[in-house]
Image (spheres, grey):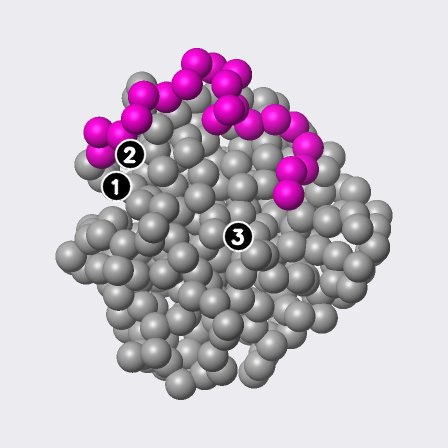
Amino acid sequence: MCIGLAQLNPLVGDLEGNSRQVLVAARQAAAAGVQVLVTPELALWGYPPRDLLLLPSVLRRQQQVLDALAQALPEDLRVLVGVVDPLGDGGDCPLHNSAALVVGGGWRVVAAKRLLPSYDVFDERRYFRPGDQPGLVEIPLAGRLLRLGVTICEDLWVDPRHLRQPTYNCDPVAELAPLAPDVMVNLSASPFAVGKQTLRRELATAAAARLGCPVVYVNQVGGNDELVFDGHSFVVDPRGNLALQLPSARPATCWVHLPLPHGPVAPPAGGPGAPRGGIQN
C-alpha cells in the first residue's frame, strides 16, 4: 500500500483556498501511485478557526466546498480531510472536530476527535463535543479491506509515561486495539514548542507498539496569529523505526510504501464500504 502525507499550510477561514491546496497535493500524490492521502486536522478550515465555527454561513460553505472537492479529486485516490461535522441536534457545542473520507465523487465523516484540549492555547470545548466511538474505517484497497484507525491530534496524547498534562476519561489508542487496525493515522495541528518533535515521535512509537501497526502522523505548517506550526510529519513502523520524515516549516507532499496485510476480501463497489455524499455521524 502507498500512503501519502499532505503537510499543508492552510489559511484560517479560506475554505476554498485550503481545498485547492488539498487538490494540488492529491493530484501530485495520485501521479505517484498513492492510494490513501492524509491531510492535517481541520485542513479545510485552518487551525484554530475559533469563532468562525459559530457562523452558520461558513458551515454551509464547507458542505459546498467538500462536494466540489469530491468531484475534482483523482478518481482512485482516497483522501482523509480534516473537517467540521455539524451534529444538528440543538445541543451545546453542536459540532465534532472530524475526519472525512473523500473518494469516488462522494464523501462521508468517518471519525470524530475524542479528546478536546482546553488548556494553554487550546479552547476546543468552547466549540466542539467529543466523539464517543473509536475511529475505524474499512477501505477497499487492492481487493482487500484496509482497516484504518483514525485519530485526531490530542487523541494521541494519552500515554502517561510521556505526559504531565490533564488526564482524560478515555484512551482512544487503547480503544482502537481490539479493532485491529492495519494502520493508524493521526490528523494533527500541533504548534511548535522546544522538544515537542521528540515527544510526538515517542507518543507515536508507543501507539505503534500498542497497536502492532504503523502510525502515520500529519501536521500542518505555517503561522496563524500567535501560533506557529512546524510540520515535521512522519511515519513510524510497528517497531517504532522512522519510515518517513517530512521537513519542518514548509508544505510538502510525500509518500511511503507500507505492507498491505492479507485481510478480508473487499465488498463489491457500492457496498457497505462505499462513501456517500453528505454527512454521517
Residue 95 image offset from top left, x and y in percent: 70, 55
The quadrant of the picture occupied by the N terminus is top left
Direction from residue 51 to residue 30 in the image, left or right: left
Callout 1 touching callout 2 (CB < 8 Å): yes
- Give 224 or 33, whichever is nearer the viewer: 33
Q: Which mark is residue 256?
A: 1
Quarter of the image containing the C terminus? top right
> What amino acid is at disc 2?
Cys
Task: Identify the mark at residue 133; answer none if there is no mark.
Answer: 3
* Mark 1 vs mark 3: in front: 3
Q: Which residue is mark 2?
A: 2
| Marks 1 and 2, the one that precedes in the sequence | 2
Q: Tag 2, which secondary structure?
A: strand
Write the residue at 73% across / 49% down: 87
**In front: mark 3 or mark 2?**
3
* Residue 50 location, quadrant: bottom right
| In the image, residue 34 above or below residue 39 | above
Going by the numbered disc 1, the residue's amino acid type is: Val
Residue 174 seen: yes
Left/right placement of residue 56 relative to residue 242 reads right
**What is the crowding at mark 1: few (fewer than 14 residues within 10 Å), some, or many (at least 20)?**
some
